Amino acid sequence: MSRPSTLRSEPAEPGRRPTDRVAPLTQYVLKLVSRCDLACDHCYVYEHPDQSWRRQPRMMAPATVRAVAERIAEHAAAHRLDGVRVVLHGGEPLLAGAARLDATAATLRRVIEPVARLDLRMQSNGVLLTPATCEVLVAHDVKVGISLDGDRAANDRHRRHANGSSSHRQVLRALSLLRSPAYRTSYAGILCTVDLANDPIRVYEALLAEEPPHVDFLLPHANWDNPPARPDGHTTPYADWLLAVHRRWLADGRPVPIRLLESLLSTASGHGSRSEAVGLSPADLVVVETDGTFEQVDSLKSAFDGAAATGLDVFRHRVDDAAAHPAIAVRQSGLAGLCATCRACPVVRHCGGGLYAHRYRAGNGFDNPSAYCPDLLKLVRVVTAAPVADEPTRPADPLDERVLDDLASGAGTAASAAQLAAVHLAMVRALLVTLSERAAGDPVAADGWRLLVHLDDAHPAAVRAVLAHPFVRRWARRCRDGAAELSYLACVAAAAAVRAGIRADLPVPVRDGVVSLPTLGALAVGCERGVVRLVTDDGDVRLAGRRVTADTGHDGDPAREDGPDGWLPVRYLRVGGDRLLLEDTDPHRECYDLPVEPRLSGAAALRWTRQVERAVRRIDAEAPGYATGVRTLLRAVVPLRAAPAGRSRSAAAGAAFGAVAVMPVPDDATLAVLLVHEVQHLKLGAVRDVCTLFERDGNRTLRVPWREEPRPLAEVLHGAYARLAVADVWRHRPGPAAGGHFRRYRAWTDGALDALLGVDALTTTGERFVRGMRATVDGWS
Ligand code: SF4
Ligand code: SF4
């Protein structure tokens, strides 16, 4: 396609200058040449799904270079940038030849330098570097990085010519030229791609021998669809490889800056990262292809064909337009641009979710942790000495204000409830990431973790269904705190394997005579404790020759009695199209300060399920606003033992999001109220997982109308939120008795809200939430 020779911008949005809405870009990768003289088999330009290089002109034309330079200068002037960095790239930029390099560098300096300082660089394989080219590079102060993967054996593993011959000798010659006093000022450093087959220390020594001013290590390009190779089922082989280098580097007194490690150390001391591979510093970089089109970072070519495209070019669009492109802007948004799992991860400020391209998965794009997540976690922890048993951080990107306001009203839409469920899932995943490092030291857990990682890739819905189970999170939290066994991770993985219908053979722990499979049930075995080998196959579970069909709930019979095969299936109750578990087997359900019922008989289970079904239908009819939350968030009902005398009680636990525990109740109307009440606790608990509602002195206490003794602020807010909903239910019930209940609950809610708003202990978000509740109550009059 021919391009106009002068710049022409598409009209800016009326009333808004482009510079009002974008963060500036300071780094530009110019694809001077779209072809290469090597044929490295790990190259993301030529050997990965994106084949757009075939459609590009071989070289960037001088008019395009000028257009790029003018766009950069225009952008630098508009944003008053002190300096910009331009990297001449390829393919192989040295294929342009000395004369073209000379002209390109001269144009860039002539056009950009009057506006901003220009840091001009080149990334090259070095094969064609000659003294003549070095003269040009030094004359224009172009700093050159050379790609080298280690000694000859290491480098030859991938970095070869198309005919298979080695490039090693030519690369060493280039490095020797750059080391020489005449050209040393143009020597920027060495870029090395990690290969597990190479010995890390030999690679490190080979790189050091070239006396580079800087070294950088790159993980081989991978994503969730093409996951990193993990030989022998190793969980963190890339971290282990890099940590071997790290140990030696420290022992040597850090003789050369290694960008990846220095970046992690920089984040550990509270500063920004110097690498886009780690940290939360904005990736303020854009690529310009040889035809002048703007693209996102090159490494995205490893994701899918066209992954890096923006549809913009230097002839028709400003750099501002590229910066405003959603795919570029999201990479400038730091924490907010990461997936929920990363946002909740304890090391996110160091890791930053890894390289953007490594997060890709067909189906949900880049909204994932890195495919190198376990490696990054370990690397970060060791290099930055981050604490091992951290609580996952609260995602610093709290709920959208509209969601918060919606939930503060008391009821809330299905979309808001779904967002809370997503937060819960992210917290569980973050906890598992935290535990995965310890899993390496426990053979049963390690097998489970490997299976889970595989299933998460191949059968994500099955993994999601298990991780969303309320008591998986409770187990993970207890495990993190040293109060539960890590080996249960194998039970989590086995349950996901059954749900996925795949064959898996793994050791699982026996506790109290059963193997527990969350969301499915439990299998009684002939010993109280120990480890047994479990085989899952096409939805069946086999153990010591016994085969049981683990009904995954499609036709779950609530009255099903335990069979002679020892299988104790979870019973389901159906509320419309939704399905809840009647949970009486999970070993981690004992998290309430009330005793849980042991395994129910089929007849008792049938009574429970029928009553819960009727109660939910009653909520549908009486308080549809709350029915949404109940149906979206409630995943399990845990039967509690009946109290010898007195009122029926219910409970919810923050660590068991999605579960409500209830004692037997005399009627459906009472159960409906209890379910609404407890689901409010679940909702508020999930809000508090991501939003700070109280200032530091939130441990103060307050008097509330429904208790004699003062209660902590959080409990007051929980009590008010639950009572607001109960008042609303009674408001919709007919009869004078209902009116009396409504007035009592409303008065309690009123009193608690006044008390909360009267103390100076709410954050801005907390006050907004309480005022939202207040508006609902006031609206009733
Ligand atoms: S030298 Fe660089 S651009 Fe060329 S094939 Fe190798 S990795 Fe790809
Ligand atoms: S979840 Fe994994 S990829 Fe995301 S920040 Fe944590 S360690 Fe990094």
Image: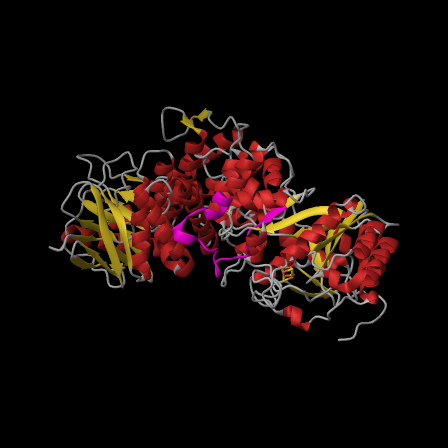
Residue 230, magenta (yes or no): yes
Q: Quadrant of residue 702?
A: top left
Q: Quadrant of residue 764?
A: top right
Q: Residue 199, relative to residue 51: is it above or below?
A: above
Residue positioned 18% across, 34% down in the render: 645
Residue 132 placed where, x, y %? 82, 56
Q: How many marks?
A: 0
Q: Is residue 755 above or below residue 560?
A: above
User: Is residue 1 on the magenta stretch?
Assistant: no
**Ligand 1: quadrant of the figure:** bottom right
Q: Which residues are magenta?
A: 216-241
Q: Position of residue 323 (x, y in %)?
A: 71, 56
Q: Nearer the viewer, residue 699 or 367?
A: 367
Q: Nearer the viewer, residue 281 or 372?
A: 372
Residue 523 place in picture, x, y as percent: 19, 51
Confirm whether residue 707 shows in the render.
yes
User: Quadrant where the N terminus lies?
Assistant: bottom right
Q: Position of residue 389 (x, y in %)?
A: 43, 34
Residue 56 or residue 733, whichever sits in front = 56
Residue under the image location 24 percent in, 56 percent down: 535
Residue 471 seen: no
Left or right of 199, for residue 172: right
Q: Nearer the viewer, residue 198 or 115?
A: 198
